[in-house]
Image (cartoon, helix red, strand yellow):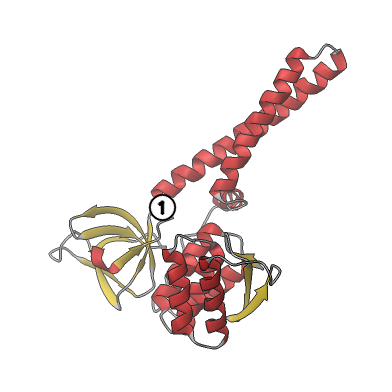
């Protein structure tokens, strides 16, 4: 069960079936964004995916963003047979809820509808472990954890300094060392995630077909062809061209107009 940031409704999906759940007392007043979100849920359950998309996007326009809202949009676009938009919103949902099983499953359904079957580069055991650690929490949670740990270390260290009893001083000292180690670990992970995110400038392809070239023009070599819904990592840009890398490590230049960035 997933909840949007400020909404009183939660959504759970299985095989793209939207389940509508009331989470607060019926007497409690709803905000305009909550009302739009609810109307989107109702429209989806009636099979009116066009209006569901409209309500959800109006909710986004009001500044409300959450994994559940992106997830709902991904499902609605999938039902409306708009695969590129579906993948786009599933990917945005995965950024906010990286370990959500429903999002992963429904995203794979949408990915299976794309033409390009790109094999992922194999990951070493170290890379797999690193990704597991990074995805344990979202970036904001790692940041909060780091702040809490440095605050706790400060409290324990001050307690060690001002404690008058030897047993307490020993306890506070070793406790502060443990917390300091945890803080350094958390800070390092937060820093590495931030650096990784700066390097990962992902986008989704929004055109039926596009060619990737060895140069930012059509005078170079044609390297490969991509199709709608493919996820790429933007490496560089020059005028109307962007240099991209796809999941198998291949790189090339494509026209900028056909890419929609997955901005956080």
Q: Is residue 102 left or right of residue 161?
A: left
Which picture quadrant has residue 190?
Answer: top right
Q: Position of residue 131 (x, y in %)?
A: 56, 52
Q: Is residue 136 above or below residue 258?
A: above
Q: Position of residue 108 (x, y in %)?
A: 53, 73
Circle 1 is placed at which residue position?
200
Residue 112 visible in the shown view: no
Q: Position of residue 110 (x, y in %)?
A: 48, 77
Residue at x 66% of width, y 66% of height: 28
Q: Is residue 57 left or right of residue 227?
A: right
Foreground residue, 250 or 20?
Answer: 20
Q: Residue furthest left?
A: 219
Q: Residue furthest bottom?
A: 47
Q: Is residue 247 left or right of residue 234?
A: right
Which picture quadrant has residue 60?
Answer: bottom left
Mark 1 neighbour class, 10 Å CA radius: few under 14, some 14 to 19, many 20 or more:
some
Foreground residue, 159 or 126?
Answer: 159
Total number of numbered labels? 1
Foreground residue, 226 or 238?
Answer: 238
Q: Is residue 178 above or below residue 92?
A: above
Residue 213 visible in the shown view: yes
Point out the image quarter for the N terminus: bottom right
């Amino acid at each position: 069960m997933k909840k949007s940031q400020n909404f009183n409704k939660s959504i759970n999906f299985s095989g793209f079936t939207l389940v509508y759940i009331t989470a607060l007392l019926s007497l409690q007043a709803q905000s305009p964004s909550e009302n739009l979100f609810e109307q989107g849920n109702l429209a989806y359950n009636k099979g009116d995916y066009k209006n569901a998309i409209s309500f959800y996007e109006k909710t986004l326009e009001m500044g409300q963003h959450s994994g559940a809202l992106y997830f709902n949009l991904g499902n609605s676009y999938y039902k409306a047979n708009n695969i590129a938009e579906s993948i786009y919103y599933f990917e945005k949902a995965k950024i906010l809820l990286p370990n959500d099983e429903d999002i992963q499953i429904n995203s794979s359904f949408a990915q299976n509808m794309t033409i390009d079957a790109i094999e992922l580069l194999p990951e070493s055991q170290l890379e797999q472990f690193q990704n597991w650690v990074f995805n344990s929490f979202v970036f904001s949670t790692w940041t909060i954890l780091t702040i809490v740990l440095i605050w706790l270390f400060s409290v324990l260290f001050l307690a060690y300094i001002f404690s008058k009893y030897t047993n307490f001083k020993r306890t506070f000292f070793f406790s502060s060392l443990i917390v300091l180690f945890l803080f350094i670990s958390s800070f390092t992970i937060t820093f590495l995630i931030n650096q990784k995110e700066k390097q990962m400038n992902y986008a989704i392809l929004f055109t039926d077909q596009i060619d990737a070239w060895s140069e930012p023009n059509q005078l170079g070599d044609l390297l490969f062809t991509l199709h709608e819904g493919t996820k790429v990592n933007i490496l560089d840009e020059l005028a109307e061209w962007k240099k991209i890398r796809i999941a198998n490590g291949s790189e090339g230049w494509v026209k900028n107009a056909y890419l929609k960035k997955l901005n956080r």
